[in-house]
Image (tube, grey):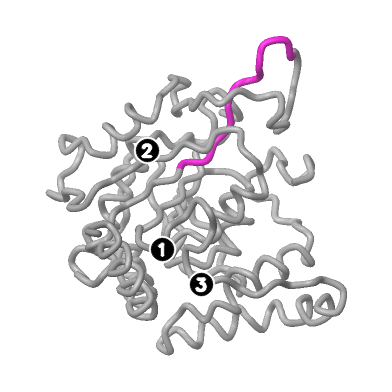
Amino acid sequence: MPHKVCAKSPTYSKFLPEARAFFYHKYWAAHGMYSEHDSRHRSRAISSFHRYRDSWASTLRIPGVPPRGILPRLHEHELTIAIHARRGDFFKVGRPMVPVATFSRVLRQVMAEIQEHNKTFARMPIAVHIYSEGNPKKGYKGDVGHDIKRLNSDFHDADGKVLDVVAVTEIFNDKKQDDLGIVFRNRLRVVLHVSQDTVESLHEMIAADLFLGSMSGMSLHLVGSLNRGAMQLLPTRIEHTDEWRGHVKFDPRTGHIGKKELKGMRRYWREYSDANEKSAKRALDMWMNGKQC
């Protein structure tokens, strides 16, 4: 991704329309992953991209769109949650940093709805994929920007503390911070993707069932507008346009989701869950049968 895209302002949205149209076709419009009840929102969003997609269809070779969860690191039998966590010692000025504990509280509120809906997704194992950047490696001085070759693979929480996958998993499983009584019924695994390929990470954040973002251009304007999952849970309210759909705001300090936002969250999840019920059940049944063999 060009360095200019990683602008200091979290409201920067001038991404190339050609790139947006390509990812939109690949991960949203062509999936047909929403129920008929959402046709009004979907048709508005699709129409805003047609002029870009159609004009570039002859010059871009758009591959066949894969089914849900077919990416190498995302599995169809798992409920996949992608989290974009900003590095704890990076870009603190004017941007509230979202700690892992807050992401955990947000996820538990979503899980309350998923378990209440009680469809196939509620029975799936849960995979939490966290995408972030490490510190500059030894020997590199000055601003290295977002050059992943110059960054290590240590994950830094919002306070700058280094956490490994065991520590992050313990935070997500910590019942003390949960007033909803939510327990992850099935196994929960955490995968840290720190200083990994940007485009590959972007593909996965777009393709995940749920996306939890930070105050950054990538979260708010790139993944937020291209995500093809159930919803994007973001730490701020942004002005809705035709390219946004499924945006749910949470408090970046407490993780609290307001009543109005919860209502939208329930609707988004049920539409997505119902539309994907058959494929989700097939994937889970195949995995369980294979596991028993």
In front of the other: 281 or 232: 281
Q: Pointer 1: what residue?
A: 76
Quote the CA–CA distance across marks 2 and 1.
32 Å
Look at the image and give the residue range highlighted in magenta. 130-140
Do the numbered discs 3 and 1 sit on residues whose CB atoms are within 8 Å? yes
Determine whether, in the image, residue 27 is placed left or right of residue 97: right
Residue drawn where x is 79% and y is 82% of the image: 54
| Foreground disc of the pair 2, 3 | 3
Q: Earlier in the sequence, mark 2 or mark 1?
A: 1
Q: Is residue 245 left or right of residue 285?
A: right
User: Dividing the image into 4 quarters, which one contains the C terminus?
Assistant: bottom left
Taken as a whole, is the magenta stretch helix, strand or loop?
loop
Q: Amino acid at mark 1?
A: Glu
Q: Residue under circle 2?
A: 253
* Mark carried by residue 67: 3
Question: Is tag 3's residue or tag 1's residue first in the polypeptide sequence?
Answer: 3
Q: CA distance from mark 2 to mark 3?
A: 36 Å
